[in-house]
Every structure is written in structure tokens, then in C-alpha cells.
Image: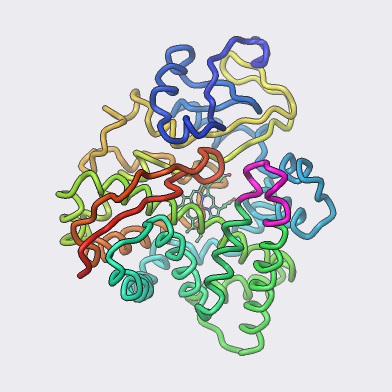
Amino acid sequence: MELASELSLPTLPVETLEFASNPDPFLEQARAGHPWLAKFSQGYVVHGYDELCELFTDDVNLLPGFGPVIDFYGVRGTMWARFMEEIVIAVGGDTHKRLRSSVIHAFTPRRANREREMMQRVISGMLDEWAPKGAFDFAEFSSYFPVSVMCGLLGVSTEPIPRMRDALENQLKSLTMDQAAKPLFMAGWEVLWDFADTTVNEREASGEFDEDSLLDAIIAAKKEGKLDETEARFLLLTVVVAGYDTSKNQLSVTMNLLLDRPEMYQRCAEDLQFCRAVTEESLRHTAIASPVRTVADDFTYEEFTFSKGDMLVMAPPLANRDASKFLDPGEFDPERDNKDRHVAFGRGEHICLGQFLARNQLQEGLHLITQRLRNPRRTGKAEWRPFLGAWGPRTLPITFDPA
Ligand code: HEM
């Protein structure tokens, strides 16, 4: 066994924009040096499919959490730091089980299917506003999409959408490890907290209860003593934050793929079932989230010993392009048999809570978008967001025939 830090592993420059705009050549080179692990400036990147699944699922020595981010910005003691350290995505063990189980019944496939009509209504409303423009930046359009659906899901007014969207954009800038982002995400946090607090207070004051409502599930868990006042608001915000960049970027990624495949685009307009296949293959071909883990205690996995404090980027977008699992992984093929074996939603105890909602909103979104934005063409080059955090096109300018 050797210390991973002392081995000459290949490097994957995951923090560079060159990598973000086309990771394949870098990945090919790294795989020639080692089949599943590479280094980067802050730690390691796990890119092999089997190893990623095993490490996500089995290893108690790998902790989620944003401690290094909080320390980087020197904001310990603030409410934002509490949020980043105490939310469901950042904790493990019994606390994680308690938080997750308090609302898991609100995230089942059956519940997510009941939201399809609401999603169609919200997306159609957005398209009524956007389609007549005839041209826009699809990445900007996407950024209104999950917030609008989330407001529908929570049964709250769409009035806070513009400021929520800006606050969410700024919130996720915290993951870029750039000091200039600090005033932006701290200010964004105030907006988000105010939204969560007002939403919970107003719903409780209304005295209404709907057993299918996500918001009411959170409030009920609070009343049953499973969550305290702050945890309930944190959970609400986690859902909003975790579902924002992910859903919007996955929608942009899918559009980016379809722009070069007009026949598939047309089929999406005609066939919701085909939209399901396209959504799944988009999640397989270009997954957008790479969660980070920190080593809690020295441990050995296969031939490597990792040391306490090491950082591991768990990279579903790269594992989904592992040729030992997916034939011709660079091909976008919605007919691929095993496309749903992708790891875009992670694995193990933190596997995405919102995956069924995410799938449904992408499928419904795609079906309606392809009907209303006909014959789309690129009007400029797609620029990419950094690979770490939530990957995907930053800009995707298009023109189309409104319908
Ligand atoms: C295409 C869209 C999405 C993608 C690719 C995605 C991806 C992921 C991934 C990879 C994780 C695991 C994180 C980890 O292991 O550290 C995760 C967790 C999570 N996601 Fe999603 N997500 C998406 C949409 C959503 C939506 C729409 C919601 C809410 C409605 C949501 C809520 C959550 C929550 C609450 C967790 C934390 C679960 C836990 O820690 O137990 N996600 N997501």
C-alpha cells in the first residue's frame, strides 16, 4: 500500500475552463495513466465507474461537507456557515438519517408524478412569455425554469422569482473559492433565508394543510418534533438550492445536445416517451454535478492509502463516460439499453432526494419547449461553466421559429 500523495498519478485539470469546455481529451490521457484515479490541484478525482459507486456507497471515512469552503472565506459563526455545515447534504450518520427521513415520503416517484400537471402549467406559462422573442440565451431561459417549478411545488407566489434567481446564482458562487464571491453569496443568503422564513410563517398562519405538499411535509415534520425551527427552514432552502443549478444546467446541456440533432429534437416535440429516453441519456452523457468528499480518517482503498483531510472529487460526469460500462460513451444515444445505469444523481445515502422531480420537470420541459421553439439554431458559441460545482453551458444563444 502506498500513500496516494506519493504516487505519480496523472493530473486532471478539473479547475480549468479548458477542461470544462471539453474534458474528453484530458480524460483519455488520464485513463491511460491510471484507470480510475487522478490528481488535481486540491486533491484527487475519482473517475472510474465501479470505484465511484463503491466509494459513494461503502466508505464511512469519506464525509460530505463544506468545512473547507467555510474556512476559505473565514465566515465561521455566521448563519450561512451553519447552513452549509448542518444541511442534509453536508452531514452524515444519524443526523443525516433523521433529516432525510423526515421528508423522504414527499419525494417518491408517485408524488413526483402528481406534480406533472403543475409542471406543464408553469413551463407553458414561461414559454408564453419567452417564445414570442424568437431568439434568446437558452441558458438564461433555463435559469428561470427550476425556480418557477419550485414555487409551483411549494404553492407560493411567483413574485420572489427574480430576486430568488439572483440570490441562487450568487449562492453557488461560494463553491468557486474566489474571495470576490463572498459579499455576493452572503447577500444572496439573506434573500434566501427571508424567503424560507416568510414561506414557513405564512403557511403556518394560513392554517391550511395539503398532504401532497412538500412545504406541508416539512412543516408537519417540525410539528412532530423531527425537525426544529431552523432545520425546517434549512431543509426548505436545501431543496431550493440543490434543485436550482442542477436542473437548469441539465436542461441547457440537453438543449445543447439536441441543437446538433434536429431529428431527435422533432421527436421530442411529438413523443413524451422519447423525452424520457433523451433525459436519461442526457444525464448519462453529460451529468453536471461532482460532489466533494473529505477523508475523515486515513484509509486504504484498493492500492491507495488516503490521508485525513484529503479532498476527493467524486465525478459522475467522468464515470458516466467510462468505456468499460458504456459502449462509445461519447455518443449521445437515447436508445442505449443501459443509459439508466448512470450515476448523475450520485449513489449511497446522499443519492439525490429530488431525482424523480428532476426527471419529470426535464421530460415535461423538453416536450413543451420542443413544441414551442421550432427549428432552433445556434447564434453563438456555447460557453461553459467551471466543471466543479454545477457544470453546464453558461451561455447558449439560439434563434428559433416561435409556435
Ligand atoms: C438534474 C438535476 C439534478 C442533479 C443532476 C442532481 C444531482 C445530485 C447529486 C449528485 C446529489 C448527491 C450529492 C452528494 O452525494 O453529496 C444530490 C443530492 C441532493 N439533491 Fe439533487 N440533483 C438534481 C436535482 C434536484 C432537485 C430538483 C432537488 C429538489 C427538488 C434536489 C435535491 C437534492 C437534495 C435535497 C440532495 C441531498 C440528499 C442527501 O444529502 O441526502 N436535487 N443531487
Residue 80 position within the rendered picture, expressed as x and y whole percent measured from the top left: 74, 57
- How many numbered discs, if any? 0
Q: Residue at 30%, 31% (x, y): give it.
A: 330
Q: Which residues are magenta?
A: 173-184
Point out the image quarter for the N terminus.
Answer: top right
Residue 259 position within the rendered picture, expressed as x and y whole percent measured from the top left: 25, 48
Residue 277 horizontal side relative to residue 209, left or right:
left
Q: Reply yes or no: does residue 175 show up in magenta.
A: yes
Q: Reply yes or no: does residue 18 show up in magenta.
A: no
Residue 262 position within the rendered picture, expressed as x and y whole percent measured from the top left: 17, 49
Residue 81 position within the rendered picture, expressed as x and y whole percent measured from the top left: 76, 53
Q: Residue furthest front?
A: 379
Question: Which corner quadrant of the image does residue 127 belong to?
Answer: bottom left
Q: Residue at 62%, 43% (x, y): give it.
A: 176
Q: Nearer the viewer, residue 164 or 317?
A: 164
Q: Residue at 34%, 23% (x, y): give it.
A: 324
Q: Residue at 27%, 58% (x, y): give it.
A: 399
Q: Residue furthest right?
A: 77
Q: Nearer the viewer, residue 129 or 307?
A: 129
Vertical arrangement, residue 95 with respect to residue 307, above or below:
below
Point out the image quarter for the C terminus.
Answer: bottom left
User: How would you classify the magenta stretch by its main secondary structure?
Assistant: helix
Q: How is the image coloured?
A: rainbow
Residue 340 horizontal side relative to residue 14, left or right:
left
Vertical arrangement, residue 272 with respect to residue 117, above or below:
above
